[in-house]
Image (tube, rainbow, N blue to C red):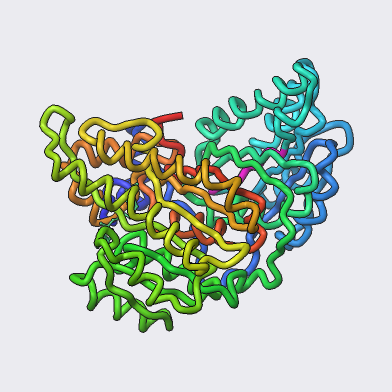
Amino acid sequence: MNDRYLAFANSNTGRRLVGALGLPAPLRLERWMAGRTRPVEGALLLGGQGELAEAASAVLNKLTDQNFVVEEGRFGLPRWTAEGGPKLKALVFDASQLTRFEQLIELRDFFQPALKGLGRCPKVVVLARAPESTRDLVAASVQRSLEGFTRSLGKEIRRGGNVQLVYVGEGAEDQLEGVLRFLLSPKSAYVSGQVLRLAACAEKVRDWTRPLAGKRALVTGASRGIGAAIAETLARDGAEVVLLDVPQAQDALDGLAARLGGRGVTIDITSDDAGERLLEALPDGVDILVHNAGITRDKTLAKMSDEFWNAVINVNLRAPQVLTQALLDGGKLHDNGRVVLIASISGIAGNLGQTNYAASKAGVIGLAQHWAPTLGQRGISINAVAPGFIETQMTAAIPFTLREAGRRMNSMGQGGLPQDVAEAVAWFAQPGSGAVTGQVLRVCGQSLLGA
Ligand code: NAD
C-alpha cells in the first residue's frame, strides 16, 4: 500500500536518478479500471502456424480494436511498428506445431524482432499442446521445453510485462477466449511465468461485461484485505455476494456488504457448528465458493507452540475442507460450481518460520488437486490461487528488511495488490473456467521463491 520506492522510481526526478544510478526501476503496473471494455488496448501480433492459430485468431479479433497480423512463414516486426506506428501491446505465439528440436529456433525467430516493438506492460502468451497428449518422445520434450522458455522470457521482458504458457487440450480450443481475456488484459498484471492447462468444458460466458450474472458467491475472510477485494470484484462481474468473517469484523463486513448489494454472515470458520451455520446462512446454496480466510502464526519449528500450529492448520486448511464438505453433503454447492482456495507461494517454496503456514497452504493445493476429479463429475472446478507478496495489513506487519525483500524479489520488482489476486479468482469463477481444474495459479509477479 505504501511502497515509497515504487512511487519515487515512477516520479520525474526519481526516474532520472534511478536511471543514472543504475538502480532497479519497477514500473507502475497497468490495472483494469472501471469503464474499460477491451482487454487489449493496442496492437497485437499473432505468430506461429500450428493447429491453434485459427481458433486464437478468431478470439483475438474480438479482444482488440487494432489490426493484428498472422505472419506467413517468415516472422518480423509488423510493418506499422517498424515504420514508427503503435507499439505492440500483446504477442501470442502458437507453438503447437513445434515437434522437433530444430524447430525450437522458431521461438527466437518470432520473439526476437517482435520484442523490439513492445510498448508498456506488454502481455505474452504461448499456446501449446500438453506434452502428455503425445506419445512421440521428442514432440513431448519440445512442448515441455516451452515451460523453460516462457519462464525465462518472463524474467527478461521487463517494462512491467508478463509471459504465460497455456497448454490447450483436445476439444478445449473453444475455451481460449476466457483465458486470453484474462492473460492479455491488465487483469493479470501481477501474474507471470505461469503454466495453465485447458480441458474441454461445455459452459460458456454469455455476457463478458457481467460474466458472473445470476451466480451467488460466498467469500470467507471478506471484511478486509484480499477477501474484500475478491468480494468487490465478484460483485463487479455480476455475482450476488455473501461475505463471511469473524463476529469481531461485523461492522466492516456489513458496511462492505451493503455497498456491494450483498449480505454479511459472521461465523468463526473453526467453530464446531460452522458447517451447520453456513448451511443455514445459504438456504439456496452457492455457485462460487472462495476460501480466503487465513492467518499466520510464525515461529521456527523449534519454538512452535501447539496453539500456533493448530490455529493455522484449523483456519487455513481444516476449515476449507470441512465447509466445502458440509456444502456438498447438504446439496448446497450447485452443479458447475466453482471452488477457489487461497494458498500462498510459501506452500510451494516453503518459508523460514512458517512450517505451520506452508504446510496449511500446500495442503490447500492438495485439496484442489485431489478433489478435482470427483467434483469434475458434477462440472464443479476447484483451483488454488497462490499469492506472493501482496500489499495488505498482513504484509504491512512484516519487519522492514524482510518486507523490502518480499517486495523486490520478483520479476516486477514490487508487491502485488489485493485486486491482482481478486482478478485471478474472478476468472476462475467464470462459467467457461470449468476448463481449468485441479491447478495452482501463482499471483506473485514471478517471485524468485519456488518454481
Ligand atoms: P487479512 O489478515 O487482511 O484478512 C484475513 C481475513 O480472514 C480477516 O478478515 C480475518 O478476520 C479473517 N479470518 C481469520 N480467521 C477467521 C476465522 N476463524 N473465521 C472467519 N474469518 C477469519 O489477510 P490477507 O492478507 O487479506 O490474506 C487473505 C488470504 O490470502 C489468506 O488466506 C492469506 O494466507 C493469503 N495470502 C496473503 C498474502 C499476502 O501477501 N497478503 C500472501 C499469500 C497468501
Q: How many marks?
A: 0
Q: Which residues are magenta?
A: 121-127
**In the rendered structure, does residue 124 fall within the stretch colored magenta?**
yes
The picture places residue 260, in percent across and down from the top left corner, at 42, 79
Q: Is residue 224 left or right of residue 410?
A: left
Image quarter where the N terminus lies is bottom left
The picture places residue 17, in percent across and down from the top left corner, at 32, 40
Q: Residue at x 58, y 69 (%)?
A: 36
Query: Residue extending furthest right?
Result: 72
Q: Is residue 7 visible?
A: no
Q: Residue at x 20, y 41 (%)?
A: 309
Q: Residue at x 18, y 44 (%)?
A: 297
The overriding secondary structure of the stretch rendered in magenta is strand
**In the rendered structure, does residue 75 fall within the stretch colored magenta?**
no
Q: Which of the pair 136/278 is nearer the observer?
A: 278
Q: Quick check: 435 above or below 37?
A: above
The picture places residue 264, in percent across and down from the top left corner, at 34, 77
Q: Which of the pair 65/56 is nearer the observer?
A: 56
Q: Is residue 177 left or right of residue 322?
A: right
Quadrant of res 208: bottom right
Q: Which of the pair 152/297 is nearer the observer?
A: 297
Q: Quadrant of ligand 1?
A: bottom left
Q: Is residue 285 left or right of residue 113?
A: left
The picture places residue 41, in percent across and down from the top left corner, at 64, 59
Quadrant of res 378: bottom right
Q: Is residue 250 visible?
A: yes
Q: Residue at x 45, y 40 (%)?
A: 366
Quadrant of res 432: bottom right
Q: Which of the pair 357/278 is nearer the observer?
A: 278
Q: Quick check: 213 above or below 188?
A: below
